[in-house]
Amino acid sequence: MGSILDQIPNFFTPDNVRMLLEAAWMTLGMTFAGCLIGFGLAFVLVYLRQTPGLWALPLRVICITYVEFFRRIPFLVIVYLVLFFIQAITPNASLFTIAVIAICLYSVAYTADIIRGGLESVPHTQVEAARTMNMSRFQTTVMVVLPQAWPVIIPPAIAFAVSFIKDTALVSQIGVFELAFRGKELNNQGFSGVLVFGTIAFIYFILSFPLTLLGQHLEKRLATPRGQRSARKIRQS
Amino acid sequence: MPHLAVNAVRAKYGSHEVLRGVSLSIEKGEIAALIGPSGSGKSTVLRALVGLTTITGGDVEIAGESIDYRNASSVRAARDRMAIVFQQYNLFQNMTVMKNVTLAPIKIKRRPRAEVEDEARRLLDLVGLGDKHASYPDQLSGGQQQRVAIARALALQPQILLLDEVTSALDPELVTEVLDAIRRLAAEGMTMIIVSHEMAFVREVADKVVFMDRGEIIETGAPKEMFDNPKTERARDFFGKILRH
């Protein structure tokens, strides 16, 4: 224990602190870039999946297969798959890009079901009313269904992104300079594992806890019609 | 030539045939009421007319123009001419009353906003809700929501208004305000098909009463002869059951 305390002045040097902050920034950046792009693509996927008609059957099969496939393989395996696949095409692709693509592929599969659940929570009679007014499927989705689905979609989507902050530690395996990678590096330099990974754990907590609170706050806000109205008023003012 | 002609229309839910050759015709300005026991296919007739239920046989003509429900642009044309009001109002919960009424005229029919909003105010006055344009549906009672739904349908400037059990989901004390709104439309000469269980109201406003049972039209007639002197056994049986309570 004494040796850990002795290491502290040497460990928290400006260089190490800056390196850890950069690593934290890297972790946050790739999580949110991946999740945001993935979230957007998941909307497209769900919209395609819900295309009615026989001609769209292959489209539906592809969308369902994608979701079921990527939900059933470990994230680490996706990371390696993307790494080797991308490097085969463009050997110069940055590891950060590869990490973002992997996170993206994975978050599409997970958030697609969250989005589908949200859209399906809106009563079908709302869609029928819109269709009899000659609104197209796209117009109905954007103007009528989505605004009512947000309260159902947003909280679990944020929860997913927040929990994913820590799961991105797995991309340290391919050498992205994020938190877990830097932790191993510092540990290899001879710093105590307890000190290094205790610090890393604390940073992960600091990154995700405020976001968890934000998610809970939004969930409460969006849960009631009155909350939705006050949210609307704030947006309008 | 009738304004709307429905000829031998058939429809199925799965293997169950809900409409078994329904024919009826309506003149301009006429009000037809569809009555009959629940499950007789009254609402399905209205749903089929606006293309929410697939027709498996027969045809529909509006103003002499045949509608092909397998053809998207033909269905659009039908929906341009007919507007439907649902039992559960189906107002868009995320929009104010004004937005509910003006959305389709502005975004779909591409009419000028100022003109549409002026008309929306007139229509909301007509249904007695001139002061509610900024409210959201969940701030209104069922009767108020249903009147907004009627105004929303009228804002589409339909040639024919379809009313699907518009008072069935309402508390008894709220029924009158909705029926009053429909009376005002009747006075304005609106062509309507009304599915209703309010027999006294049907008798008062309808020009023609159509009695349906098990997906078929059993009897058609003027309200007075239909209610006072039904010709068929099944209609007599139905009226007997309603009057007993």
Image (tube, coloured by chain):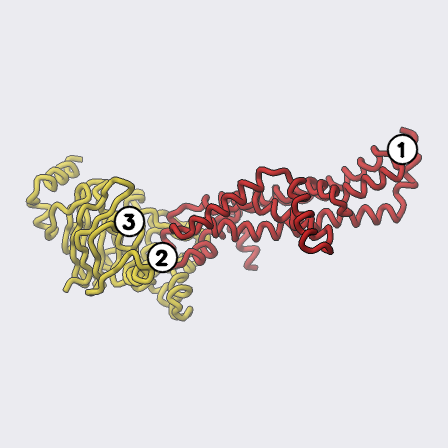
Chain colours: A red, B yellow
* Residue at position x 33%, y 59% in the image: B72
Mark 3, secondary structure of its residue: loop
Of the residues under marks 3 and 2, which one precedes in the sequence?
2
Q: Position of residue A140 (x, y in %)?
A: 43, 55
Mark 1, secondary structure of its residue: helix
Residue B129's disc number: 2
Q: Position of residue A197 (x, y in %)?
A: 80, 36
Q: Chain of mark 3?
A: B
Q: Chain of mark 2?
A: B
In the image: residue A30, left or right of residue B69: right
In the image: residue B106, left or right of residue A45: left
- Amino acid type, residue under disc 3 in the picture: Val
Q: Is residue A213 visible?
A: no
Residue projecting furthest to the top: A1
Query: In the rendered image, which residue does mark 3 sit on?
Result: B166
Find the distance from the CA under tag 3 to the CA under tag 2. Answer: 17 Å
* Residue at position x 39%, y 47% in the image: A124
Q: Is residue B16 visible?
A: yes
* Residue at position x 85%, y 40% in the image: A186
* Residue at position x 25%, y 55% in the image: B182
Query: In the rendered image, which residue does mark 1 sit on?
Result: A4
- Amino acid type, residue under disc 2 in the picture: Leu
Q: Are marks 3 and 2 on the same chain?
A: yes
Find the distance from the CA under tag 1 to the CA under tag 2. Answer: 74 Å
Q: Quadrant of residue B67?
A: bottom left
Find the distance from the CA under tag 3 to the CA under tag 1. Answer: 76 Å
**Which numbered mark, 1 or 2, is in the foreground of this view?**
1
- Amino acid type, residue under disc 1 in the picture: Ile
Contact, CB < 8 Å: mark 3 with mark 1?
no
Towards the viewer: B100 or A37: A37
